């Protein structure tokens, strides 16, 4: 068994063990989304650098006094990933048929009118990562 076979076997096992996320109720998405501050390159970089310190990776100046190249790498990598997500990530949503219910009442000279309906087609939407 070669290294490629081991990698494929490992990836297959990890994919099989990974469960899809449970969908959140719409009100939960809205309630949490309005509180979010957005993605911060600086915050992510600082957290990774802090975690590196906990792993025993030197995060201060290099022994010769120069800037730490690992920190520079983390900052560069984080900035590029966040920029790519912000500029090119695609978010799509779907409103399934039957999920929007409409009820209306009114009236005219002929008497009261009650109407009930629902969306019969799905609808899609788009969003952005910020």
Image (cartoon, rainbow, N blue to C red):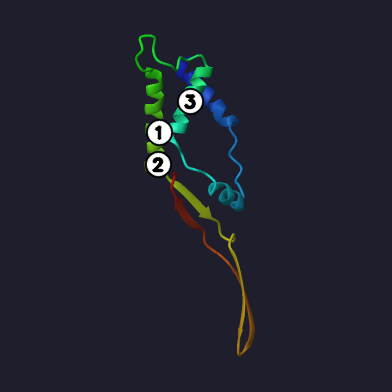
Q: Which residue is pictured at 45% across the width and 17% down the height?
A: 59
x, y percent for residue 27? 60, 53
Q: Quadrant of residue 88?
A: top left
Which circle's residue, 1 or 2, is located before the other in the chain?
1
Q: Which residue, as the protein is rendered here, is positioned at the far front? A: 65
Q: Horizontal placement of 82 versus 96: left or right? A: left
Say which of marks 1 and 3 sits in front.
Answer: 3
Q: Which residue, as the protein is rendered here, is positioned at the far top? A: 63
From the viewer's side, name the closer residue of 74 and 37.
37
Q: Which residue is pictured at 49% across the width and 20% down the height?
A: 52
Cα separation, mark 3 vs mark 2, equals 19 Å
Q: Which residue, as the protein is rendered here, is positioned at the far bottom? A: 109
Few, some or many residues within 10 Å of mark 1 (<14, 14–19, 20+): few
x, y percent for residue 22? 61, 42
Few, some or many residues within 10 Å of mark 2 (<14, 14–19, 20+): some
Few, some or many residues within 10 Å of mark 3 (<14, 14–19, 20+): some
- Quick one: quadrant of the C terminus? top left
130 up-or-down from 1: above or below: below
Q: Do the numbered discs 1 and 3 sit on residues whose CB atoms are within 8 Å?
A: no
Label 3, secondary structure: give it. helix
* Residue where numbered disc 2 is placed: 86
Label 2, secondary structure: give it. helix
* Residue where numbered disc 1 is placed: 81
Q: Which residue is pictured at 47% across the width and 42% down the height?
A: 38
113 up-or-down from 50: above or below: below
Which circle's residue, 1 or 3, is located before the other in the chain?
3
Q: Report the disc number at residue 48.
A: 3
x, y percent for residue 110? 62, 89
Q: Report the disc number at residue 111.
A: none
């Amino acid at each position: 068994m070669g290294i490629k076979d081991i990698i494929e076997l490992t990836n297959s096992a990890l994919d099989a063990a990974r469960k899809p996320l449970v969908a959140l109720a719409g009100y939960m998405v809205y309630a949490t989304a309005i509180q979010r501050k957005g993605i911060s390159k600086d915050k992510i970089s600082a957290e990774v650098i802090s975690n590196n310190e906990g792993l025993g990776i030197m995060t201060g100046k290099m022994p010769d006094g120069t800037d730490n190249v690992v920190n520079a790498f983390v900052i560069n990598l984080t900035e590029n990933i966040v920029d790519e997500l912000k500029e090119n990530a695609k978010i799509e949503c779907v409103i399934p048929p039957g999920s929007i219910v409409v009820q209306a009442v009114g009236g005219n000279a002929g008497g009261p009118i009650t109407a009930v309906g629902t969306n019969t087609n799905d609808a899609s939407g788009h969003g952005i990562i910020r």
